[in-house]
């Protein structure tokens, strides 16, 4: 197995394809990157900017380049000795006209060759109906869209389609008869009954009536293709038949303003295997599983072996060829049986590096039976971020926040409230489906005979809103002690919360823990198992939408803690927790990924590094934020205090260093605020936008950042923001070194080798200036060779351009490569710091064979240094020191040699550069 030394995440888009990646490969190699970490590169919806809306996983995405372009990129990476970690998407595909498998299902229904591909209601093993698949893709109510003429019937070589803007859905075969027999008498009179083409048309109509009942499977598909070919031939060669079909299209498509004229098309649409609907209908009448609550992403039944093999065929080929040297599994928690999936994946792909996108709560661990190398790094991100938040100031920040917004907020209660909101507004149909499954199970037992559908739905809703983790991993074969304890804890809490549902909770506990009665048949046991595995698929989406995409935009005490996989009720992580986390990683998951920014993070890693500085200075922050609010009162209009508090933190964290970026900053923040307040779902929401409130927010942003309108605010804001930014730089350097030296594989998100002040997507997917980075790297490499200690003062003086972060990244990755075995396999040893400022230093050793490396980074610098004073030397660190055996140490960042007795003074170690990485042989 190839274990990556360092990964670098690239977001492939139609504007950044295979050729563009090839152009930066040598730069990445020079930086010290060992493996390209690629966003999905499989055929996706046209124009996709992220690649997760796959339409065919068996093909490369032609929007990224040709197969030759791909081969050239692969050749370049392999010539540089670089690997390729590929992000794959087993859970879902795009609900799109470009998805050939889904279009086949929508056209042929149960006769499709791909009926088992998608997680739709009639694929349930216990379904007793085949209701039409919902297509909630209309921007308006169905009746309105129809009568405005937005839904149009069209005909082309591939047959009849229903078109709604870019959406194009096929018509089932039976609909052709309705369409072609309408007004047929007129064509008879025009052509005459004995005309060869008219006879052919009658023959087509006869075959159309026979096909559904006479043939199935591949034979049926061939006959349909034959029929479509005949119709197209008649349409292409006979002007009268062309006119007949074109006239019918015009009639069926109706006349806006004449409601009756749309009856024919309405009747035709009602006859399809799908039901076109307003997109909001998906929240309440969902009959297919989605990715979270996204109607346009339909889930795949990857648990079916045929589906697994087809969707992984190209992946397997590229793994076998040595192109993909690692896989990152997107949204593992969405799968019906993640454990089984990972077993199959490991069996198919062999000894390849595998990580999963998995959100873990603070003390949660991965299932120990998963044959993977770890996670994609959110757990590390939240630990390393939390260790720079000064936990002792929690009470002060509670007071500041509650005072500013004029209300007290209880985080656990808020989480539960927002989860219930998501259940009611976005997942109601999914919970209805679960309740129906449970009702079907309960009705077979005398103790479940009196359970109502409503009662069971309320019990399920209460249970999953109380879930403290993303999901459990119960399989038909086993329930882990951890999962059992989690379910029992949640059930016990739920019993207290809803005492009137005691019997329902008792029954749910019995089913979820698979406590089968002896009298159960095998089929009944399988129904229980099916319900449990289905229910496990919904706790994750509820957590993601209720917490990540709602609560974390409402609970704004300190938004650096509001991150994917984070829990902002924990105000910081102490050093002991951080060390323990790293020790556990070294023991159990030594090759997991260590991320500090990803394509999904709420804000850039350096925005968080800045905002954590606020945790050190609560009194000053309170004074500033209240002053700003008072100054801006005349501009605030409808903007509520919570959103205002959120905005000020955003401005402090994201304000760019470079003047040329400030012009676009206003627009970026306006777009971000719209997304944030819609996600919060308090004053506006995606489902019900409030244009007046949104306009008030964007206007507020525009006014307070306009020097001609808000000179007093900006004169007050800029000095404080610059101070936070200065200290944030040192937090960022510390965070970077910890990521590179802690157990795990350090991962860099594109562009973050310089300062990263991006906001949530799409802001964090803006183009990266790689030429600037290449230029900086070349200069730094030359300076290191000639006069390393001479270049550091310049980097410190000019630190706003980001070269100091690039220098640290280069030097630390060089060290990691040189001493790879030490960093991949070395024991993790927390080091105790002594002296006046012991709490301001994080230090640990990595030890393997006869080599020892020590990482030393500072934190909480606002009380140690004055603005403009780097955290260097004895005047700052005084008597702070580490107790170490007498050795000769080499600082791999500055190339200094340090000779120690039984102590190592921090002032000596941090004499030239703000962080240190020492090595002793």
Image (cartoon, helix red, strand yellow):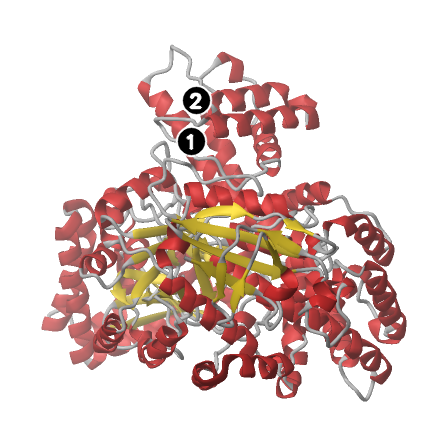
Q: Nearer the viewer, residue 769 or 516?
A: 769
Evaluate whether residue 562 shows in this view: no
- Answer with left or right where residue 182 lies relative to residue 407: left
Where is residue 593, by image quadrant?
Answer: bottom left
Looking at the image, is mark 2 or mark 1 earlier in the sequence?
1
- Answer with left or right where residue 277 lies relative to residue 240: right
Evaluate whether residue 778 shows in this view: yes
Q: Nearer the viewer, residue 142 or 396?
A: 396
Q: Residue furthest top?
A: 518
Q: Nearer the viewer, residue 237 or 240?
A: 237
Residue wearing tag 2 = 514
Residue at screen point 39% across, 48% down = 132
Residue 307, horizontal then vertical, whole percent: 26, 48
- Between circles 2 and 1, the one closer to the viewer is 1
Residue 478, horizontal then vertical, whole percent: 38, 26
Asked if 245 appears above or below 737 in the picture, the reply is below
Helix or strand or loop: what does disc 2 sit on? loop
Asked if 307 appears above or below 39 in the picture, the reply is above
Q: Nearer the viewer, residue 442 or 216?
A: 442
Residue wearing tag 1 = 474
Point out the image quarter for the C terminus: bottom left
Badges 2 and 1: C-beta atoms under 8 Å apart? Answer: yes
Helix or strand or loop: what does disc 1 sit on? loop
Report, in whole angstroms, how far the alpha carbon at label 2 lies from the one at label 1. Answer: 9 Å
């Amino acid at each position: 197995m190839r274990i990556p030394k360092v990964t670098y995440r690239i977001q492939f888009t139609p504007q950044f394809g295979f050729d563009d990646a090839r152009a930066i490969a040598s730069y990445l190699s020079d930086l010290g990157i060992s493996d390209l970490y690629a966003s999905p590169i499989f055929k996706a919806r046209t124009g996709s900017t992220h690649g997760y809306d796959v339409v065919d996983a068996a093909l490369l995405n032609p929007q990224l380049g040709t197969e030759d372009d791909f081969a050239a990129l692969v050749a370049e990476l392999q010539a540089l000795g670089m690997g390729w970690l590929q992000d794959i998407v087993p859970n879902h595909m795009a609900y799109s006209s470009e998805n050939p498998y889904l279009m086949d299902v929508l056209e042929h229904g149960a006769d499709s060759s791909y009926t088992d591909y998608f997680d739709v209601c009639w694929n349930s093993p216990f379904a007793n109906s085949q209701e039409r698949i919902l297509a909630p893709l209309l921007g308006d109510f169905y009746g309105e869209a129809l009568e405005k003429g937005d839904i149009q019937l069209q005909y082309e070589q591939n047959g009849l389609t229903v078109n709604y803007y870019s959406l194009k859905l096929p018509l089932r075969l039976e609909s052709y008869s309705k369409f072609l027999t309408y007004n047929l008498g007129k064509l008879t009179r025009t052509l005459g009954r004995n005309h060869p083409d008219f006879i052919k048309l009658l023959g087509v109509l006869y075959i159309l009536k026979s096909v559904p009942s006479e043939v199935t499977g591949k034979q049926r598909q061939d006959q349909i293709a034959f029929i479509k070919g005949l119709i197209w031939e008649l349409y292409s060669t006979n002007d009268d038949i062309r006119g007949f079909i074109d006239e019918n299209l015009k009639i069926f498509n109706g006349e806006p303003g004449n409601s009756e004229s749309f009856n024919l098309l309405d009747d035709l649409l009602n006859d399809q295997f799908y039901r076109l609907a307003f997109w909001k209908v998906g929240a309440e009448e969902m009959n297919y599983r989605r990715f979270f609550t996204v109607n346009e992403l339909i889930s795949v039944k990857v648990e079916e072996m045929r589906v697994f093999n087809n969707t992984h065929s190209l992946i397997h080929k590229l793994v076998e060829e040595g192109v993909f040297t690692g896989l990152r599994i997107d949204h593992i928690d969405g799968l019906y049986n993640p454990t089984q999936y990972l077993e199959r994946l490991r069996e198919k792909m062999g000894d390849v590096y595998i990580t999963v996108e998995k959100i873990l709560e603070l003390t949660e661990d991965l299932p120990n039976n998963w044959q993977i190398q770890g996670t994609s790094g959110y757990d590390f991100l939240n630990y390393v971020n939390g260790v720079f938040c000064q936990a002792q100031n929690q009470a002060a920040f509670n007071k500041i926040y509650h005072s500013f917004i004029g209300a007290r907020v209880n985080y656990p209660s808020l989480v539960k409230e927002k989860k219930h909101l998501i259940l009611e507004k976005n997942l109601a149909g999914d919970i209805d489906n679960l309740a129906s499954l449970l009702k079907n199970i309960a009705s077979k037992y005398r103790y479940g005979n009196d359970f109502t559908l409503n009662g069971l739905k309320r019990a399920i809703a209460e249970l999953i809103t109380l879930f403290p983790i993303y999901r459990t991993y119960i399989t038909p074969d086993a329930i882990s002690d951890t999962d059992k304890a989690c379910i029992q804890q949640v059930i016990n809490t739920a019993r207290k919360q809803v005492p009137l549902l005691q019997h329902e909770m008792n029954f749910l506990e019995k089913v979820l823990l698979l406590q089968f009665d002896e009298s159960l048949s095998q089929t009944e046991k399988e129904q229980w198992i099916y319900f449990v595995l289905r229910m496990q698929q919904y706790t994750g989406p509820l957590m993601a939408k209720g917490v990540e995409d709602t609560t974390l935009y409402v609970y704004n005490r300190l938004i650096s803690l509001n991150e994917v996989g984070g829990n902002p009720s924990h105000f910081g992580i102490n050093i002991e927790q951080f060390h323990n986390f790293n020790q556990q990683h070294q023991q159990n998951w030594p090759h997991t990924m260590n991320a500090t920014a990803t394509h999904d993070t709420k804000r850039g890693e350096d925005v968080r590094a800045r905002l954590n500085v606020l945790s050190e200075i609560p009194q000053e922050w309170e004074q500033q934020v209240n002053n700003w609010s008072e100054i801006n009162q005349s501009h605030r209009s409808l903007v509520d205090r919570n959103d205002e508090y959120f905005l000020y933190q955003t401005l402090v964290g994201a304000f760019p260093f470079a003047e040329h970026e400030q012009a676009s900053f206003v627009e970026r923040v306006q777009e971000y605020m719209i997304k944030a307040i819609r996600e919060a779902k308090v004053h506006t929401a995606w489902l019900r936008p409030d244009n007046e409130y949104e306009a008030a927010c964007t206007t507020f942003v525009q006014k307070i950042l306009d020097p001609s309108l808000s000179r007093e605010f900006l004169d007050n804001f800029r000095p404080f923001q610059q101070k936070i930014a200065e200290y944030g730089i040192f937090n960022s350097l510390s965070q970077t070194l910890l990521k590179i030296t802690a157990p795990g594989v350090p991962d860099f998100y594109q562009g973050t080798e310089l300062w990263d002040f991006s906001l949530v997507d799409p802001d964090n997917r803006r183009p990266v200036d790689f030429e600037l980075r290449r230029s900086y790297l070349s200069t730094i490499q030359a300076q290191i060779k000639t006069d390393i200690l001479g270049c550091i003062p310049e980097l410190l003086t000019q630190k706003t351009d980001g070269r100091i972060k690039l220098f640290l990244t280069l030097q630390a990755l060089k060290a990691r490569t040189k001493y790879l075995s030490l960093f991949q396999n070395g024991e993790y040893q927390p080091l105790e710091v002594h002296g006046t400022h012991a709490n301001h230093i994080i230090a640990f050793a990595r030890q393997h064979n006869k080599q020892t490396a020590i990482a030393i980074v500072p934190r909480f610098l606002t009380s140690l240094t004055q603005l403009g004073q780097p955290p260097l030397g004895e005047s700052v660190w005084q008597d702070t020191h580490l107790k170490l055996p007498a050795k000769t140490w080499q600082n791999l960042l500055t190339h200094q040699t340090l000779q120690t007795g039984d102590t190592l003074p921090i002032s000596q170690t941090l004499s030239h550069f703000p962080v240190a990485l020492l090595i002793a042989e």
